[in-house]
Amino acid sequence: MNAPVQTAEAREIALAGMGASRLRKEDARFIQGKGNYVDDIKMPGMLHMDIVRSPIAHGRIVKINKEAALAIPGVHAVLTADDLKPLKLHWMPTLAGDVAAVLADEKVHFQMQEVAIVIADDRYIAADAVEAVEVEYEELPVVMDPYAALLPDAPVIRDDLAGKTEGAHGKRDHHNHIFTWDAGDKSAADAAFANAEVTVSQHMYYPRVHPCPLETCGCVASFDPIKGDLTTFITSQAPHVVRTVVSMLSGIPESKVRIVSPDIGGGFGNKVGIYPGYVCAIVSSIVLGRPVKWVEDRIENISSTAFARDYHMDGELAATADGKITGLRVNVVADHGAFDACADPTKFPAGMFHIVSGSYDIPAAHASVKGVYTNKSPGGVAYRCSFRVTEAVYLIERMVDVLAQKLGMDKAEIRAKNFVKKEQFPYTSAFGFEFDSGDYHTALDKVLEAVDYKGLRAEQAAKRADPNSPTLMGIGLVTFTEVVGAGPSKMCDILGVGMFDSCEIRIHPTGSAIARMGTITQGQGHQTTYAQIIATELGIPSEVIQVEEGDTSTAPYGLGTYGSRSTPVAGAAIALAARKIHAKARKIAAHMLEVNENDLDWEVDRFKVKGDDSKFKTMTEVAWQAYHQPPAGLEPGLEAVHYYDPPNFTFPFGIYLCVVDIDRATGETKIRRFYALDDCGTRINPMIIEGQIHGGLTEGFAVAMGQQMPYDAQGNLLGNTLMDYFLPTFVETPHWETDHTVTPSPHHPLGAKGVAESPHVGSIPTFTSAVVDAFSHLGVTHLDMPHNAFRTWKALREHGASL
Amino acid sequence: MEVKLDKQYPLDVDSARAWALLTDLKAVASCMPGAEITEQLSETSYKGAVKVKVGPAVAQFGGTVDVIEAVASERKMVLRGKGADKGGSSASMDLTAVITADPANPAHCVLNGQAAVIVNGKFAQFGGRMMVQVSDMLLAQFVENFRQTALTLPTAGGTVEGSAIQADAAPLSASGSTPAAAPVVAREINGLAIFWALVKGWFSGLFGKKA
């Protein structure tokens, strides 16, 4: 069975393993419209659910009249909170230790809150019946501003929490207060400020935005009343966690609950949580004994499922007169909406916000985040970032710019001066993170040289000297560090389940393989990249390695895909599962070649006898032997499972530079150049990495330049359609230039750190840095996002820079 | 969302007749496209309905209108309207309307209106960005209907002040004097017409600027 003799290099290329820009296996079905999304699933006897939602932001429900809706032919049921009460399902726990109403119980807390559901023969009848459900409200005063929410006489948003002075994260000192979370050393930070030669402070608002994946959320729940088991196809980034929660809420044993995440059209954090729609569809299926489908529309998706950000931040830096940062203080008021439904590891109500010291060696730092209830939709998920890292990176990068401006220093120079140096790694930050590896200076120099930074500054100076210049030129620079790969279970859990991940690999007798994972791809290309890891580890061509995820009945338990954790956590699980197989294969090969294990060398796809290239056994041959005649004392078969609990997070970093030209007459901002250098450690598939970076930069561009959820004072969301909510197409999207350095993670089996979120996290402050830079000679230190033409035009007028 | 309006409409109607009409809430309501008073609850309180049609979407607002203040000497009327429709929209309006005389022409007057309109629910979400334009359109239609109705009222025999006092003394009796030959008024708000008017307005603004 030996293949014709080929060089090791040729055989390695044939594997298409790690480092190969292998084409995505997923695309063949997606570009032909053959994907299988939740809304593609049709089951015999399936009914359809639609949701009656609150038109107002705050009010008591006086009366719900179902009669007219029930009278419509084809309507099977109309359910309200009162119907769910006997099942104790009218409220549900959130991932953040709060509770959220499944259907509004006596009052509504935000516009578009779920009030009642309708089950009907088809989607159209359901929608008609929703219109026919009459709900009478008594309006209550609305609180949209988190600062106003904390005033002594502010209206009470959560009547259900009356008298509760203790929340999931400590004391509540006001009826609209959720938690106050502190990190770092306050007295050390205060001392740094007391002794500082220079201090700067800046208030900034990171607007409420929505991840807005192309596919909205939905599910098909199917309870079999004969067998007593429940199958639910669902748009979830964490199907195994959903199974555990469904079992806990419904009382159905976890072994009889099957959750399947089929193809998912983008998640970006929006599909981490458990939504009332899922719960209602499952309850309806159990009650009616028939499959029930619920798929929300775009307006429902933006209005009611999890938002991101909404952080009101105050940053302060203390420094020496020559620009060495000595202290950092941060205060945040976080608007969590009506229920605290943040998707964070349990112990971290502000996620990994304490990465806020950035890439800089800051000796003393303190951060405090106060979570507040308002009459807005719940959420607070990581929109293409790792748990509030985007907010943290935004704050520190803005603050370093503000300090540079105050000192009259160049923003590249001040960064280089404060970077954690290469030789300081592993570096423990003032907030206690242990940064695994990095080389910021090399990366910064590479970018500055690539864009001719000095030349750009000279051009900018010339433009500023010309009063008739039609544009203002700005240069943005960001040098960020992310914390991803949550996470070590000693620190990180979701509802008590440690944030490990898992992989099961089976090598078939003829040498092909299947791998099943606890993660779930939503566009990341897991089926492609995971196979490449196994290909390199085991010498099997990636083409014959099948990767399956998302079905809890077949896949090993895992915490899912978000927070750039797939490669740092699941990628490591793959490598270690493969290495278990490799170890067994070596025993078998030694037996076949009649030598000692230690006399074997591994080369690409085969075990060779040391010193004799003609004596070898390929992995394919070993696989056959494993099923045919394993050595005495070894069990047959060739498979392994590994659950990987990471020893630490990983810390990818990047250096981003952006040049903008702002039209002084219209306020329109043209992105002239965007240069993104990323270091994600070992690179598994460079083509997919580049695609991920393009996607992340585009979403970062969307957030910085246009996305926001605009609420009016009465609590109406005025931008919940794609007419208003900015999703850039190729028309608006600028050209991206990408680059990389490679600094492997020392604690990860592959040295890989994760990449998909870096471009989002890093690019957003880069755009702001560039836009503010265009105004900096006018004394402007900060402009809040979004930097759309109208807001920028107003800034031009305000600072006398308009034409 | 809240929209504040402050409008002045010169009318070719004398102040007395304009005031007489303004104090007749039923007649005034019928000047508003799609609106009507369905029931009088008390001396100063009415039940009403407004039907709005924008394309295929029809909203039927039911609610109340209260006369907060009616000062004949200033020809000032303060109203508060509140309503909601079953489909999930609600609206409220505080309106102050004042009739002032045209010093140059006693046969003419000016209708001054200040309104704060708050709209909630679907109308605010989906119609928010057109609120000001649509309100302008509605008011323009209302004022035209108001003018035509006022012109059909009999001219007062006495002085301007005299008729105003009379109207104030018996504000509701004025409805009895509304002539049978009511003018043709638009009976509902027509979305297509509003859209067309908006487009026309936009174009004329465009060319007006260039001219």
Image (tube, grey):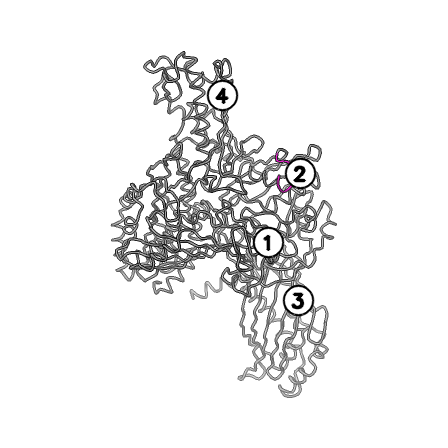
Using the image, name the chain to which the residue with label 4 belongs: A
Considering the numbered disc 4 on the image, is that residue within a helix, a strand or a loop? loop
> Would you say residue A248 sits in the magenta stretch?
yes
Tell me which corner region of the image, top left, top right, bottom left or bottom right, holds residue A140: bottom right
Could you classify mark 3 by the number of other residues whose Cα lies within 10 Å: few (under 14), some (14-19), or many (20 or more)?
Answer: many
Mark 2 / mark 4, whichever is N-terminal: 2
Q: Which mark is residue A291?
A: 2
Residue A59, horizontal then vertical, whole percent: 62, 60
- Left/right of residue A255 with respect to residue A584 in the rendered view: right
Q: Are marks 4 and 3 on the same chain?
A: no
Using the image, name the chain to which the residue with label 1 belongs: A
> Would you say residue A603 sits in the magenta stretch?
no
Residue on which the image places disc 4: A638
Using the image, name the chain to which the residue with label 2 belongs: A
Residue A38, horizontal then vertical, whole percent: 58, 38
Q: Are marks 4 and 1 on the same chain?
A: yes
Q: The residue under label 1 is which amino acid type?
A: Met
Does the CB distance between marks 1 and 2 fall below 8 Å? no
Q: CA distance from mark 2 to mark 4?
A: 39 Å
Residue A555, horizontal then vertical, whole percent: 54, 31
Q: From this viewpoint, which residue is outermost toward the front?
A: A187
Q: CA distance from mark 3 to mark 2?
A: 46 Å
Residue on which the image places disc 3: B35
Q: The residue under label 3 is which amino acid type?
A: Ala
Residue on which the image places disc 1: A112
| Highlighted range, magenta | A247-254
Q: Which mark is residue A221?
A: none
Could you classify mark 2 by the number of other residues whose Cα lies within 10 Å: few (under 14), some (14-19), or many (20 or more)?
Answer: many
Of tags 2 and 4, which is closer to the observer? 4
